[in-house]
Image (cartoon, grey):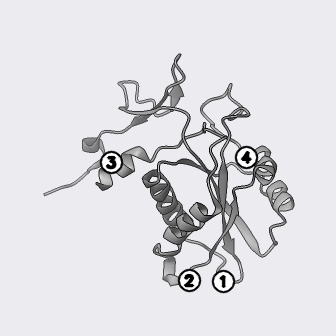
Amino acid sequence: MLLDLVTKNRSYRRFKQEVPVSLETLKELVNLARLSASGANRQPLKYFLSAAAERNRAIFPCLGWAGYLKDWGGPSEGERPAAYIVILGDKGIADYYFCDHGIAGQNILLGAAEKGLGGCFIGNVQRDRLRAELKIPETMDILLVIALGVPAEKVVLEDIGPSGDIRYYRDAQSIHHVPKRKLQDLIIGAE
């Protein structure tokens, strides 16, 4: 059921690094992105895939991991992603990407969840450094990085409390809590 898949699709930031994600799996996930809707059907997105440990080590330090977890610098060795998909915008096709990368990325993450994988959108990227590390041409905009792997953490959804605080947090058992607004608080008109 789609609701179950959407609920399983959380932002995982710790992984079982030793469990590989194959290049073939990454290609299957990009195929889901390829089939996504695209503004004016321009299809300007391209994808850089990494399932190799050495390349993953080059990508990792270019990423910021969790803005609300101020004392956490990201996953430690052994808990890092087993793979990455870098979503790029081809400037030769379009100079504006609408929400294409969000739609494509969500399809990638839903496909990953269906395969028992977890992932995380990362927008906090040292783009110049990543471009140099991966030799990404200047004709491509780096839009998002998706970290992927078998999750090594538990993520719990909960209603936002009385304080209204929307910040995710980790408890003493390292369970990651994600406050969500209630459905009735989101709908402003219905007949």
Disc 1 or 3, which lies upstream in sequence? Answer: 3
Q: Residues within 10 Å of mark 1 (few under 14, many from 20)?
A: some
Q: Residues within 10 Å of mark 3 (few under 14, many from 20)?
A: few
In this image, 185 relative to 146: left or right? left
User: Which residue corresponds to mark 3?
Assistant: 4
Tell me the amino acid under the disc marked 1: Ile
Circle number at residue 63: 4
Q: Residue 31 at x, y = what percent?
A: 53, 71
User: Which residue corresponds to mark 2?
Assistant: 42
Occupied quadrant, residue 92: bottom right
**Which residue appears at 82% of the width and 61% of the height?**
134
Tell me the amino acid under the disc marked 4: Leu
Occupied quadrant, residue 160: top left
* Number of numbered discs visible in the structure rendering: 4
Q: CA distance from mark 1 to mark 3?
A: 36 Å
User: Which residue corresponds to mark 1?
Assistant: 93
- Label 1 with label 4: CB-CB less than 8 Å: no
Tell me the amino acid under the disc marked 3: Asp
In this image, 69 relative to 115: left or right? right
Instruction: Give the SS element for disc 2.
Output: loop
Tell me the amino acid under the disc marked 2: Arg
Q: CA distance from mark 2 to mark 3?
A: 31 Å
Q: Nearer the viewer, mark 2 or mark 3?
A: 3
* 110, above or below 61, in the image: below
Disc 3 or 4, which lies upstream in sequence? Answer: 3
